[in-house]
C-alpha cells in the first residue's frame, strides 16, 4: 500500500483524532473509509435520457435548419 501525506486544518486534525479514539480505529483507516465512500458516489453516473444529459448543448451548433431532413445534405455519408 502506498503512503499519502496531506495537510489539513487544525479543526479536521482534531476531529480525526477524536473519531479515531472513539471508534478504536487508526486515522488512516478512517481516511481510507471516507475516500472509499466519496469515490463510490460516482458523480459521473447520471440518470435520464441523452437529451437530459446534453440539454445544455442543444442548439449551440450553428448549422442549416434542415440538416436532419434534407437528403441532399447526407450525400457522401454512410458510403
Image: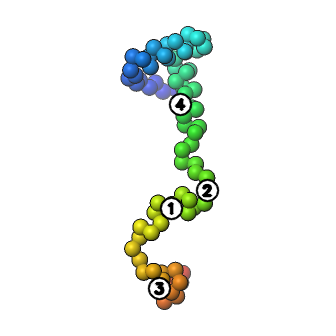
Which comes before the other along the chain, label 3 or label 4?
4
Which comes before the other along the chain, label 2 or label 3?
2
Q: Is there a contact, CB below 8 Å, between mark 3 and mark 4?
A: no
Q: Residue 74: x, y in percent?
A: 50, 84
Mark 2, residue position:
48
Q: Is there a contact, CB below 8 Å, between mark 2 and mark 3?
A: no
- Measured in 3D between alpha carbons, the distance from the residue under mark 2 to the one under mark 3, in whole angstroms, is 31 Å
Mark 3, residue position:
73
Q: Which mark is residue 35?
A: 4
Residue at 47% over, 66% down: 58
- Measured in 3D between alpha carbons, the distance from the residue under mark 2 to the one under mark 4, in whole angstroms, is 27 Å
Q: Which mark is residue 55?
A: 1
Q: Secondary structure at mark 4?
A: helix
Q: Secondary structure at mark 3?
A: helix
Q: Give the label, 1 or 3, closer to the camera.
A: 1
Above or below: residue 22 compared with residue 3:
above
Q: Secondary structure at mark 2?
A: loop
Amino acid at each position: 500500500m502506498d503512503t499519502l501525506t496531506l495537510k489539513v486544518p487544525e479543526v479536521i486534525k482534531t476531529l480525526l483524532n477524536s473519531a479515531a479514539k472513539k471508534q478504536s480505529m487508526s486515522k488512516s483507516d478512517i481516511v481510507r473509509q471516507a475516500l472509499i465512500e466519496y469515490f463510490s458516489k460516482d458523480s459521473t453516473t447520471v440518470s435520464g435520457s441523452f437529451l437530459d444529459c446534453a440539454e445544455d448543448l442543444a442548439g449551440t451548433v450553428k448549422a442549416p435548419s434542415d440538416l436532419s431532413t434534407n437528403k441532399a445534405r447526407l450525400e457522401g455519408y454512410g458510403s
